[in-house]
Image (cartoon, grey):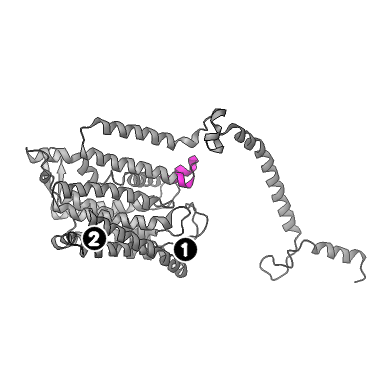
């Protein structure tokens, strides 16, 4: 555990320290796109934050390769090198997209090629645990197609949810934390060495997200861009592929009976990790809803819009920070709920706790829909917007403010219409902006000899 924590800290430190210089480089390189209709930020913000995250990934793998116990992961498995190859390719495509806006189909092709590179180096799904049938061995083509599909779905799910400051990196960090606990339990408790690469991948992924989050929280100083969102999506998919398709469920020895019984016992965890619905349930749901919504409108599934889940939270009335925290809450509830269920699926307390927390999440989600009436004796303990007197004053002063704003706007328009602008000057300069100049002109016309 100490070596995993050391790898996580090194990855986070490298990512954090490099994000500042990368931000300056992005500004110099002109990787500051104009604000689009679907964006929620008000000022142009540099992208290319994925550069710092990629070098954090490289630093984490380099440190792990020189540690005593984690070095065995590199000696016994080729999966870390497969991950680095696929990550380098998808990162390069993302950097080019952040700078030059690559077509969506080209990015999709690049994602499939990156997944194919990892498959060629051994990071692929070999079998599937199926209820009632046991382990079903996959052919080479079946494993390749399933692996590529999982990588593409995960990458685009994370990319689609990257719409608010700190949202994608925080949600992936939460998912990686739950995934790390699950993989570490299989590796340490059951002694299954095949789960070590997935444990290492999730630790490095947590470090990448933790190191980038301080620069990306609202208001963000830099965005990760596609170079970062596709990169962390690929790392998350690589961990799911490694532990789902290469760890034998019968090796867990949960039952002394047949292999079918062992598979049936682990289905609540393995099947969700396969797609993976519990780890990125919120991004995956957003991806499916976006595809259905755009196809229904006759648009391309890759056409951008403002219909994502985080956009809807803002439309309901949540602030930027609150919308991000609500998405964090639901991601943590689903990921850690599945983790707790995998530890003890027979406990009703776990199910009851998930139901209670879900009810609390729904109340927080719908909070802007109603303004509760707070008793007068409790007004000192609630935010000002829930106080009756303050709400009454705001409601009474709203028409006055609107009238004042309209009057000021009309006066500004009249002043702009009366202000002379010199010929050949693009915009108002210091001389023509003087309000007293028209009076001097009128005075000369009325009473001076000139």
Q: Residues within 10 Å of mark 1 (few under 14, many from 20)?
A: some
In the image, what residue occupies the spot 39% across and 44% down? 327
Seen in the picture, residue 425 relative to 108 is either above or below; the reply is: below
User: N-terminal of the two: label 1 or label 2?
Assistant: 1
Specify whether 403 is left or right of 446. Answer: left
Please tell me whether mark 2 sits on a helix, a strand or a loop.
helix
Distance between mark 1 and mark 2 Cα atoms: 29 Å
The residue at 15%/53% (across/down) is 194
Task: Give the number of the disc on residue 32.
Answer: 1
The percent position of residue 362, horizontal first and vertical second, equals 40, 35
Is residue 311 found inside the magenta-colored segment of the image? yes
Among the 4 quarters of the image, the one containing residue 78: bottom left
Q: Is 361 placed left or right of 351 in the picture?
A: right
Disc number at residue 83? Answer: 2
Disc 1, SS: loop
Q: Is residue 315 rendered magenta in the image? A: yes
Question: Is 151 rendered above or below residue 401?
Answer: below
Q: Which numbered marker is on residue 306? A: none
Residue 70 appears in the rendering: yes
Magenta stretch: helix, strand or loop mostly? helix
Mark 2: give few (<14), some (14-19) or many (20+) Cα within 10 Å.
many
């Amino acid at each position: 555990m100490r070596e995993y924590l050391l790898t996580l800290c090194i990855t986070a430190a490298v990512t954090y320290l490099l994000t500042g210089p990368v931000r300056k480089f992005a500004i110099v390189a002109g990787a500051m796109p104009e604000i689009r209709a679907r964006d929620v930020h008000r000022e142009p913000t540099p992208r290319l934050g994925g550069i710092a995250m990629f070098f954090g990934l490289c630093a984490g793998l380099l440190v792990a390769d020189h540690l005593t116990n984690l070095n065995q992961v590199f000696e016994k498995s080729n999966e870390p090198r497969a991950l680095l190859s696929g990550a380098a390719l998808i990162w390069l495509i993302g950097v080019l997209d952040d700078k030059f806006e690559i077509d969506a189909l080209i990015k999709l092709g690049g994602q499939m090629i990156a997944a194919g590179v990892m498959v060629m180096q051994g990071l692929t799904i070999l079998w599937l645990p199926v209820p009632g049938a046991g382990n079903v061995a996959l052919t080479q083509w079946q494993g390749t197609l399933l692996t590529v599909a999982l990588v593409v779905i995960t990458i685009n799910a994370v990319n689609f949810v990257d719409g608010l400051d700190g949202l994608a990196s925080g949600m992936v960090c939460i998912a990686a934390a739950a995934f790390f606990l699950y993989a570490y339990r299989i590796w340490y408790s059951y002694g299954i060495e095949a789960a070590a690469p997935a444990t290492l991948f999730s630790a490095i992924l947590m470090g990448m997200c933790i190191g980038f989050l301080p620069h990306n929280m609202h208001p963000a100083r830099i965005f990760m861009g596609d170079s970062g969102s596709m990169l962390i999506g690929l790392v998350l998919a690589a961990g799911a592929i490694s532990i789902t398709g290469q760890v034998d469920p019968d090796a867990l020895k949960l039952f002394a009976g047949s292999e079918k019984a062992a598979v049936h016992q682990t289905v609540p965890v393995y099947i969700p990790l396969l797609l993976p619905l519990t780890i990125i349930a919120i991004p995956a749901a957003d991806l499916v809803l976006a595809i259905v919504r755009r196809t229904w409108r006759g648009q391309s599934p890759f056409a951008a819009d403002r219909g994502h889940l985080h956009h809807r939270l803002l439309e309901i009335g949540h602030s930027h920070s609150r919308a991000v925290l609500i998405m964090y809450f639901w991601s943590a509830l689903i990921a850690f709920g599945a983790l707790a269920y995998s530890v003890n699926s027979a406990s009703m307390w776990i199910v009851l706790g998930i139901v209670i927390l879900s009810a609390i999440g729904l109340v927080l989600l719908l909070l802007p829909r109603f303004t509760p009436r707070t008793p007068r004796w409790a007004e000192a303990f609630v935010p000002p917007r829930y106080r009756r007197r303050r709400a009454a004053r705001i409601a009474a002063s709203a028409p006055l403010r609107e009238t004042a704003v309209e009057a000021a706007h009309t006066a500004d328009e009249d002043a702009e219409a009366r202000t002379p602008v010199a010929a050949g000057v693009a915009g108002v300069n210091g001389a023509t902006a003087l309000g007293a100049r028209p009076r001097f002109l009128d005075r000369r016309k009325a009473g001076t000899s000139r």
